[in-house]
Structures are given as structure tokens and as C-alpha cells.
Image: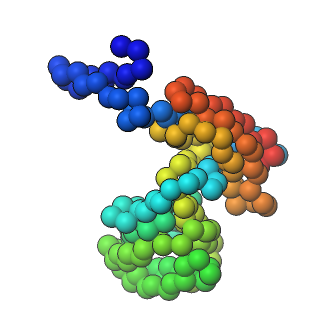
Amino acid sequence: MIGRTTVLLGLAAFVVAPSLARANGEIIGMVQGGKGRVANAVVSLVDVSGSFSGAGKSAQMNQKDKEFSPSVLPVLKGTTVRFVNSDPFFHNVFSSSTVKQFNVSQEKVGDTSEMVFDKPGIVPIRCHIHASMKAYVVVLPNPYFALTNANGLFRISNVPAGTYTIKAWTGHGAPETQTIQVPASGEAKVIFKGA
């Protein structure tokens, strides 16, 4: 049928009017740095129109073997982050960031603390007891983001067609930005070379 989209669900077929059909693509790419590909970089779209909330969503940052895991945690604003002590000794998790300030003691294995991250920005996380422990919660204003894998690769799915600014944050220096055109279907590709 011309001008209509047919959606198959099991054995039933539904016809969706063109105005209701979703036109979404994907962004795939890689983040490179001075020493090769960059793992744990946060890639996100900037200034996406619409209202987005992570209310009801949750994520977790663990403390195990005197390390935070994951060391970089991107979340949508409004997401509740649960901090869990999986070590058999005392941790004190805190941030003095203007985005989110907190200071919680987790004295023994199994202790948990939950916080809602409701303001976009970068939140450095530390432990008063173990100075080598550090991590970041990256709070984003829209759901179009990804964390690069060990090979520096990422994929952002279900992105509405359009032209966007996309940025890569690595924790070192200012984020790198580019302009990208996302098609109604298929993939847009981007490589960050100086992140």
C-alpha cells in the first residue's frame, strides 16, 4: 500500500496511517583519542526537543574490590541510582558537585543508598575512605545517549529523523561535538577523532 506502513505482530497485520508511522534511525560510531579508541565515553545528542524524564527508571553503581563499577554511568535525568557496597569493609560515597551533592556512609557489605539524579550534568563520585576510588554519573536531558564499549564503539537506537548536534565526553578536556543528519531509517555514522 502506498503511503501506509504495515506492522506485523504475530499473525495479525495492522495498517498505520503515515502520520502515525515512526520514522526513526540509528547512530553508530567510534570515539578515538590520542592513544587509540576510547572506552567508557558518553556520546549523546544535544538540545533535542521534547520533555523527557527518567522517573521510575533505576540504575546501579557497585563498590567492589575498592572500585566503583561501572566507573562511568550515564543516566536520564530523574533516574534513581542505587549505590551498593559489595566489599566487606566501610565505604563513604560522596559528591561535592553542584549538580548533585551527597555524602553517605556504607559500613558493611550489602549496605545500599538510593538517590534521584534530577539535574543534567557531570557528577564525580568518590570515597572518603579510599582516595583511589573515583567514578562519574553523567546525567543527560534526553534518552539519546550511549556508552562506548571496550573498542570505543557505540550505538544510539530509535532516534527520530533530523539534524542534531552530537557530543562525546571522555572525562578528559572539553567534549567534542559534531553535526549529524539522522535518516528516517537506517544508520548515520560518526567518528570522533580528537576526544
Examine the image and state in which quarter residue 49 appears.
bottom right
Q: Is residue 154 positioned above or below 121 on the image? A: above
Q: Is residue 129 visible?
A: no
User: Which residue is pictured at 66% across the width and 35% down the height?
Assistant: 181
Q: What's the colour scheme?
A: rainbow
The N terminus lies in which quarter of the figure? top left
Residue that appears at 70% across and 60% down:
171
Q: Residue at x 18, y 22 (%)?
A: 12
Rendered view: 167 above or below 186: below
Q: Is residue 53 visible?
A: yes
Image position, residue 170 (x, y; %): 69, 55
Query: In this orientation, which residue lies closer to the viewer: 94 or 10?
Result: 10
Task: Determine which quarter of the picture holds residue 3.
Answer: top left
Total numbered badges shown on the rendered structure:
0
The percent coordinates of residue 82 (x first, y second) are 39, 69
Q: Is residue 156 above or below residue 44?
A: above
Query: Which x, y percent locates residue 108?
Result: 36, 79
Residue 53, compared with residue 48, is above or below; it is below
Give the side of residue 5 with respect to residue 140, left or right. left
Q: Nearer the viewer, residue 15 or 59?
A: 15
Instruction: Please name the residue shown 62% across and 68% down the image.
Output: 122
Query: Which residue is nearer to you in this view: 126 or 48?
Result: 48
**Side of 193 where 158 appears, left or right:** left
Question: Relative to 84, is 192 on the left or the right?
Answer: right
Q: Measured from the top left, where is residue 42 in percent x and y?
A: 61, 52
Q: Residue furthest top?
A: 1
